[in-house]
Image: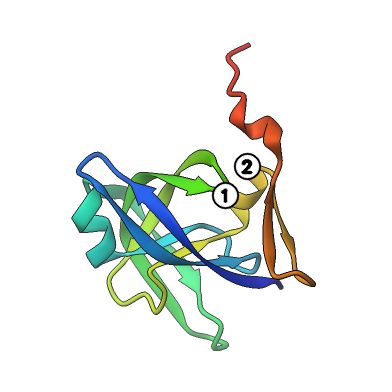
Amino acid sequence: MGLITKHLKIEGDKGDCEVETLFDTGATYSFIRKDKAEAIATILSLRHPKSFELAREGQTVTVTECTRIDIRLNGVTISDEVVVMEDLSEELILGASTMQKWRIKLDLEKEDVVVDERVARLKLV
């Protein structure tokens, strides 16, 4: 599991802000703390709640909300659906699904985030 933290600008349909972002390859989805989500984006109810296993063995949390945000990362704008959590310890966690979708790689030696420049060229084929 790799962990790197960066300050990133995020945007929603209501506005934007800067958040401390944890890049976590151990997290299946991406998550945003509810207070940050409410400030910039419309919160949507999940039709089917999702349960996530926490780092502490045997503990789970169930979430019922999500939102869509744009994330500015190294000069590239990416977008994704993120799960909204009330008491999330981080402001934003970018998980494995977002990193894989947007070809984001972590350079743990340099504590840097690398974005494949090809993601800036969106296509409809």
Asked if residue 23 is positioned above or below residue 55 in the image, the reply reads above
Q: Nearer the viewer, residue 61 or 91?
A: 91
Q: CA distance from mark 1 to mark 2?
A: 5 Å
Residue 24 falls in image quadrant: bottom right
Q: Nearer the viewer, residue 58 or 79?
A: 79
Task: Give the x, y percent position of residue 5.
Answer: 55, 71
Which residue matches tag 2? 101
Which residue appears at 24% of the width and 51% of the height?
40
Tag 1: amino acid: Thr
Quarter of the rendering occupied by the C terminus: top right
Which residue appears at 33% of the width and 52% of the height?
66
Q: Is residue 124 left or right of residue 107?
A: left
Q: Is residue 100 left or right of residue 37?
A: right
Q: Residues within 10 Å of mark 1 (few under 14, many from 20)?
A: many
Label of residue 98 in the image: 1
Asked if residue 31 is positioned above or below residue 9 in the image, the reply reads below
